[in-house]
């Protein structure tokens, strides 16, 4: 808070004015008893401290004007340290208050009988005059306090705006730049800023802004760079006063998306275990595919590792530094799938999120969009997907603005799409678009040469995760596993081995620990119920052990979308 010392020049002017009107000497003292302004014989004492116990101090304590007609004899002067040396004939003390806090006092001093008479003759007008002079000093300090608060607030706002990780530009209605933060310098060159504003404020967008509408998350390119831009009108007193732009570099957004969405981001073909002829052929095709940019359709039963193949293709392609975004078309309700894929504008439908939402197509910009269980995509969305593949742009729900997309589509399904096409359940034209490079992953029962290798690999992984020291399986366990038909494929194998590692306390996993249904010849008697029972327990344990669902999915060796689908299926929320 400011005080009288901060306005000492102004206070001196006030003192001079008072003297010229009243005709007596004036002293202005602050709340620390420092003389900040004075006239006449007291002028040389400016900056010096007056005595602690004085009429000035008393007036500040009482917060009211004091008039002393008999200095040295008045009760107010009883404790004054300067009483013996006092030469004053009369004194008037008027406190200065700022928001009811005393910041000082104005003192009028009569040094002769004539001056004393002059003070006493017009006390009522004198008090009014002093109150106005005190108010002027108080107002000056209040103004400085308000300015100080405003400057502090401006500095705080600037600091906040400069610390957020997006560029901010504010302009007036004549498109003059009022403010831009430091991030803008990293996003736009100095000469590009005006070009950016003029190009962005096209007729349609500018009309929306002039109507006070906010525009959220539109993609905009300049000089081979892409930005995600939001535009907000500045409205004051129901009038448009200016416009604020916020910009995010799509490269930065893509990096964040990649970091957030890449579970098993280190997946490569070297990390996919298998040596059987059919499996190696699938890997060979996938490797060749990764060097191209064509659409891929991965076919295989549930649990064969379709998403692992998709990630490996992405991670060994030219798009590996861009996002890999996975969507399970079977796990998302049909009513939500369209908005999940294409996004929506604010107000597009009842309950639409304020500001709208970016869809998975936009999130995957420059990278790969993996559409798992594509056979479960409803027909009306198949039409929209076909249009994206043909025309390379999307439109959010509730918008007619076209957004260009550069993504690679990898689709996967466990269903027979040929049969679905014949039944009219899947569009033939979309099937041809997706089936440019088909990759069929064989089920585990057709690659029995891989079972023993996979058993040892999964055992080591589970032992590390569960802090166990199991050396291997007994031969009769290997035999049971080799003869079992594995309807759940590698995922079922992983789940059962993790169950056995949890149950086994010895050095080897033995025959007696193996579930009974696996012991029947080729496992013909095992039911889906038994498989789901083990799967449910393993997922339940993983959710307890790990802090996040992402970690649990990684530990289970399944995709995040698959984990969420299983959690919903088994009621583990």
Image: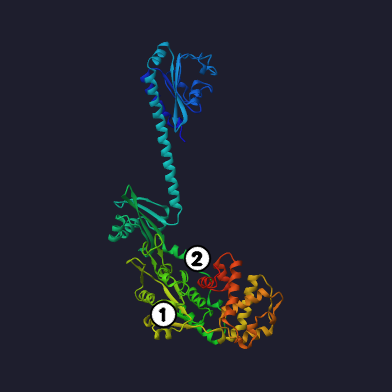
Query: Who is closer to the viewer here, 373 or 409?
Result: 373
Query: Who is closer to the viewer here, 213 or 432?
Result: 213
Where is residue 275 drawn, in percent x and y? 57, 84
Location of the C terminus by quadrant is bottom right
Among the 4 quarters of the image, the one containing residue 537: bottom right
Q: Which residue is mark 2?
A: 260
Q: Callout 1: helix, strand or loop?
A: helix
Kindly identify the residue that appears in the image at 68 percent across and 72 percent down: 468
Kindly identify the residue that appears in the image at 39 percent across and 69 percent down: 342
Asked if residue 3 can be seen in this view, the reply is yes
Where is residue 536 drawn, in percent x and y? 58, 74
Horizontal arrangement in the rendering, residue 202 relative to residue 52 (left or right) = left
Q: Earlier in the sequence, mark 2 or mark 1?
A: 2
Position of 569 relative to 209 (above/below): below
Mark 1: few/some/many CA within 10 Å (<14, 14-19, 20+): many
Asked if residue 265 can be seen in this view, the reply is no
CA gap, disc 2 and disc 1 = 27 Å
Q: How is the image coloured?
A: rainbow
Position of 211 relative to 297 (above/below): above
Where is residue 544 drawn, in percent x and y? 60, 67
Horizontal arrangement in the rendering, residue 410 relative to residue 79 (left or right) = left
Q: Which residue is mark 1?
A: 434
């Amino acid at each position: 808070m400011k005080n009288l010392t901060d306005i000492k020049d102004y206070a001196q002017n006030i003192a001079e004015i008072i003297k010229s009107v009243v005709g007596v000497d004036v002293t202005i003292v602050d709340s620390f008893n420092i003389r900040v302004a004075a006239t006449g014989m007291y002028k040389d004492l400016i900056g010096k401290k007056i005595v602690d116990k004085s009429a000035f101090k008393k007036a500040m304590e009482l917060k009211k004007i004091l008039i002393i007609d008999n200095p040295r004899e008045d009760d107010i002067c009883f404790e004054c340290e300067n009483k013996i040396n006092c030469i004053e004939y009369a004194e008037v003390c008027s406190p200065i208050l700022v928001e009811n806090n005393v910041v000082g006092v104005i003192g009028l001093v009569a040094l002769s009988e004539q001056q004393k008479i002059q003070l006493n003759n017009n006390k009522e007008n004198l008090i009014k005059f002093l109150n106005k002079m005190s108010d002027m000093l108080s107002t000056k300090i209040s103004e400085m306090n308000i300015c100080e608060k405003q400057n502090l607030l401006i500095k705080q706002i600037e600091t906040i705006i400069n610390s957020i990780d997006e560029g901010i530009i504010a302009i007036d209605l004549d498109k003059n730049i009022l403010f831009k933060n430091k991030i803008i310098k990293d996003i736009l060159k100095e000469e590009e800023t005006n070009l950016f504003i003029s190009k962005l404020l096209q007729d349609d967008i500018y009309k929306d802004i002039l109507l006070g509408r906010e525009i959220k998350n539109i993609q905009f390119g300049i000089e081979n760079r892409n930005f995600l831009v939001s535009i907000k009108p500045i409205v004051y007193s129901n009038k448009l006063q200016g416009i604020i732009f916020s910009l995010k570099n799509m490269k930065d957004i893509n990096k964040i998306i990649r970091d957030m969405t890449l579970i098993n981001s280190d997946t490569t073909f070297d990390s996919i275990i298998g040596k059987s002829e059919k499996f190696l052929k699938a890997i060979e095709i996938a490797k060749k595919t990764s060097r191209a940019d064509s659409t891929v359709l991965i076919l295989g039963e549930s649990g064969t590792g379709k998403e692992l193949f998709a990630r490996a293709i992405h991670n060994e392609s030219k798009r590996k530094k861009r996002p890999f975004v996975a969507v399970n078309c079977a796990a998302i309700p049909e009513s939500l799938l369209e908005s999940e894929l294409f996004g929506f504008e604010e107000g597009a439908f009842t309950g639409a999120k304020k500001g709208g939402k970016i869809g998975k197509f936009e999130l995957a910009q420059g990278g790969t969009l993996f559409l798992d269980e594509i056979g479960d995509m409803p027909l009306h969305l198949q039409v929209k997907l076909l249009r994206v593949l043909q025309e390379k742009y999307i439109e959010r729900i509730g918008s007619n603005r076209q957004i260009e997309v550069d993504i690679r589509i990898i689709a996967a399904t466990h269903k027979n799409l040929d049969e679905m096409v014949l039944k009219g359940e899947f569009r033939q034209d979309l099937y041809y678009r997706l089936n440019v490079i088909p990759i069929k992953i064989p089920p585990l029962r057709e690659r029995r040469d891989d079972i023993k290798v996979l058993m040892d690999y999964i055992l080591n992984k589970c032992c590390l995760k569960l802090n166990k020291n199991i050396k291997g399986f007994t031969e009769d366990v290997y035999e049971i596993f080799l003869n079992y038909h594995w309807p759940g494929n590698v995922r079922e194998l992983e789940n059962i081995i993790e169950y056995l590692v949890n149950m086994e306390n010895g050095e080897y996993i033995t025959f007696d620990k193996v579930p009974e249904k696996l012991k029947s010849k080729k496992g013909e008697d095992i039911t889906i119920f038994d498989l789901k029972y083990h799967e449910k327990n393993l997922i339940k344990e993983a959710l307890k052990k790990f802090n996040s669902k992402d970690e649990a999915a990684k530990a289970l060796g399944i995709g995040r979308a698959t984990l969420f689908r299983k959690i919903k299926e088994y009621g583990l929320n």
